[in-house]
């Protein structure tokens, strides 16, 4: 058993009674020691408490300017509605530079990188290209604007070497829009009407999400032929025989009918089988019949296990394949089911370990205890064994929390300390501007990453430092996201988190809104007298005496862990 956790098991208490106020007043101050401890023992990765970084591939970092223009995508677009150069190489560069590790990130989710429609659409918001990755043209190829297959392979390997999992964003619901350069898929594959009304199960699933976004007939079990345009594309690229042979093997192995969804499931799970992708973030979940997600999960899991067997030296742990779903407007308070009005669906029973939680941004201004207690209670009752992915800002939520970035410190405290997994949207950690002049709709949420601010603005550096400290503490302690919450004292506000899984035990104490300078934190009943604790925020070590941990720091927060 790891040395760190043996300490947890041997904690004992010298006193069983809380000292009175007089005793607390004369409590001698612990002499603080500055140190730089490192977490040397391996901490198990737990998806339920993961710290996930979500980025738009095209808007994060331009690692290869030579791939910025492809398919003559040079038409003028609306503000922030064209390609801006971000790519897979850019993500890899930031992994290698330690940017994600410094933030305590242990999983990265990036927008889809499969080949997008070549043309642009003429919308009321201005001409738009598929820079965001959700307008698929070919699931079997990567879009050269995002990078090559080798670039994706290198990204996954580099992430894994740094203890970071990779989530691919996948779309089964629709193709890209029809443009002058991109024709509609055959009628047997897609429907182009009616447009969804979102009032019943049927008019949410068997319809087009918006106008000119052809909807895959995911409910159909009828065999269909491959589109001539796709066959011609594969032939021109010299890979038609390989693609057809692999499809034959897939359908022979699985026995599935050659219906539209099964082709796409095969194409999506190839990335898992070939590269060891750790999980999927699934787009537009409620717009697809739920059995399709069970089938996707089954094949992705089989592909993941196949990859593990072929690459035993590269396997990070025994976690199964992970799927988190975007069921738009799902709230943690809904528990296991989403209500369409005329039908309730349990997506957790259809392949999903977690769903994106749209409720935290509504809860974020409640007092900390109300938020933490609510989430811990639900996750340990209605959602026991499952999880949610919390967020405060995102790429398509036009009403994010703190849109003007006036509360970046509170945002970090709420997002990174609330039970459940956390979704850090790129630029949350550096207060990236979400109110871009002349940007219409969700484009204002998708500006290029503000790297310059991190280098030049003292205020941004301070914000980033706060996110880094909380993020690393969260990464080092599964108890924060996956553990049980308990308030220890109301004022000052101090709480504990405990996570137990077999012989692994993790215990931490956190204090918020503390006085600047001298602090006295009541930890009796959780950490015994004589226990040496380390405040990871101020990097201070002290000892518990008479049920209290007393130390000084210039901060109003404490992140307490057993000192090594």
Image (cartoon, rainbow, N blue to C red):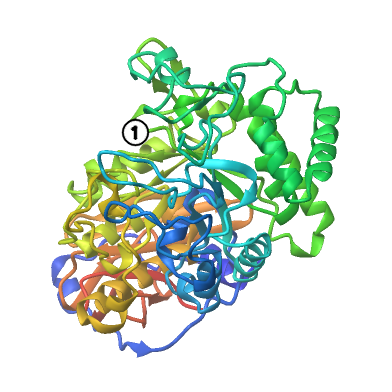
Residue 63 in view (yes/no): no
Left or right: where does residue 485 sit relative to residue 385? left
Rendered location of residue 296, percent (x, y): 64, 33
Rendered location of residue 436, percent (x, y): 20, 58
> Where 546 falls versus 280 (above or below)?
below
> Where 242 falls versus 560 (above or below)?
above
Q: In percent of the image, x 38 and y 54: which residue is there?
A: 75
Closer to the camera in the image, 315 or 267 = 267
Which quadrant holds residue 449?
Answer: bottom left
How many numbered markers are drawn? 1
Dot 1 corresponds to which residue?
331
Q: In percent of the image, x 72 and y 44: which residue is there?
A: 234
Closer to the camera in the image, 213 or 387 = 213
Rendered location of residue 366, percent (x, y): 18, 46
Q: Quadrant of the N terminus?
A: bottom right
Left or right: where does residue 3 sit relative to residue 430? right
Rendered location of residue 509, percent (x, y): 36, 63
Q: In percent of the image, x 22 and y 76: which residue is there?
A: 555
Q: In percent of the image, x 26 and y 61: which residue is there?
A: 18
How packed is label 1: few (under 14 Cα within 10 Å), some, or many (20 or more)? many
Left or right: where does residue 515 sit relative to residue 390? left
Which quadrant holds residue 27?
Answer: bottom left
> Where 462 falls versus 268 (above or below)?
below
Closer to the camera in the image, 27 or 42 = 42
Residue 497 in view (yes/no): yes
Left or right: where does residue 70 sit relative to residue 474? right
Residue with the most extreme top position:
342
Q: Secondary structure at mark 1?
A: loop
């Amino acid at each position: 058993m790891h040395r760190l956790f043996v300490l947890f098991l041997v904690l004992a208490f010298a006193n069983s009674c809380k000292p009175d106020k007089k005793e607390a007043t004369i409590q001698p101050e612990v002499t603080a020691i500055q140190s730089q401890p490192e977490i040397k023992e391996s901490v198990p990765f737990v998806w339920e408490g993961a710290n996930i970084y979500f980025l738009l591939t095209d808007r994060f970092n331009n690692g290869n300017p030579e791939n910025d223009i492809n398919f003559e995508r040079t038409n003028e677009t609306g503000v922030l509605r064209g390609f801006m150069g971000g790519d897979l190489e850019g993500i890899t560069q930031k992994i290698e530079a330690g940017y994600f590790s410094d933030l305590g990130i242990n999983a990265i989710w990036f927008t889809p990188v499969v080949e997008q429609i070549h043309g642009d659409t003429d919308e009321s918001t201005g001409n738009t290209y598929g820079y965001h990755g959700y307008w698929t043209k070919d699931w079997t190829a990567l879009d050269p604007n995002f990078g090559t297959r080798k670039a994706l392979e290198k990204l996954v390997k580099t992430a894994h070497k740094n203890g970071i999992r990779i989530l691919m964003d996948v779309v089964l619901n629709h193709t890209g829009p029809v443009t002058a350069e991109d024709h509609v898929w055959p009628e047997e594959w897609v429907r182009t009407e009616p447009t969804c009304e979102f009032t019943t199960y049927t008019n949410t699933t068997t319809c087009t999400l918006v106008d000119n976004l052809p909807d895959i007939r995911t409910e159909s079990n009828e065999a269909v032929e491959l589109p001539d345009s796709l066959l011609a594309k594969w032939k021109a690229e010299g890979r038609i025989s390989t693609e057809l042979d692999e499809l034959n093997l897939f359908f022979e192995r699985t026995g599935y009918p050659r219906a539209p969804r099964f082709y796409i499931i095969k194409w999506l799970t190839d990335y898992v089988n070939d590269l060891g992708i750790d999980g999927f973030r699934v787009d537009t979940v409620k717009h697809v019949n739920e059995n399709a997600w069970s089938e996707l999960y089954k094949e992705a899991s089989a592909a993941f296990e196949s990859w593990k067997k072929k690459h035993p030296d590269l396997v990070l742990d025994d976690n199964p394949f992970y799927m988190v779903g975007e069921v738009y407007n799902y709230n943690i308070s809904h528990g296991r089911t989403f209500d369409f009005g005329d039908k309730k669906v349990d997506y957790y029973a259809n392949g999903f370990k977690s769903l994106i939680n749209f409720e935290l941004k509504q809860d974020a201004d409640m007092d900390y205890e109300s938020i933490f207690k609510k989430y811990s209670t639900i996750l340990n009752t209605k959602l026991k064994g499952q999880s949610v992915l919390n967020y405060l800002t995102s790429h398509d939520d036009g009403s994010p929390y703190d849109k003007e970035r006036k509360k970046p410190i509170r945002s970090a405290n709420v997002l990174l300390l609330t039970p459940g997994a956390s979704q850090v949207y790129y630029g949350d950690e550096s207060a990236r501007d979400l109110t871009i002049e002349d940007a219409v709709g969700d484009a204002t949420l998708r500006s290029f990453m503000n790297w310059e601010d991190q280098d030049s603005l003292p205020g941004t550096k301070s914000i980033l430092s706060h996110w880094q400290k909380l993020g690393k503490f969260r990464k080092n302690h599964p108890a924060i996201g996956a553990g049980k919450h308990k308030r220890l004292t109301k004022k000052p506000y101090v709480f504990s988190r405990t996570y137990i899984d077999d012989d692994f035990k993790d215990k931490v104490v956190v204090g918020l809104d503390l006085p600047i300078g001298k602090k006295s934190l009541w930890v009796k009943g959780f950490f015994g007298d004589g226990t040496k604790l380390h405040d990871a925020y101020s990097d201070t070590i002290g000892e518990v005496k008479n049920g209290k941990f007393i130390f000084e720091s210039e901060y109003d927060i404490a992140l307490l862990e057993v000192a090594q």
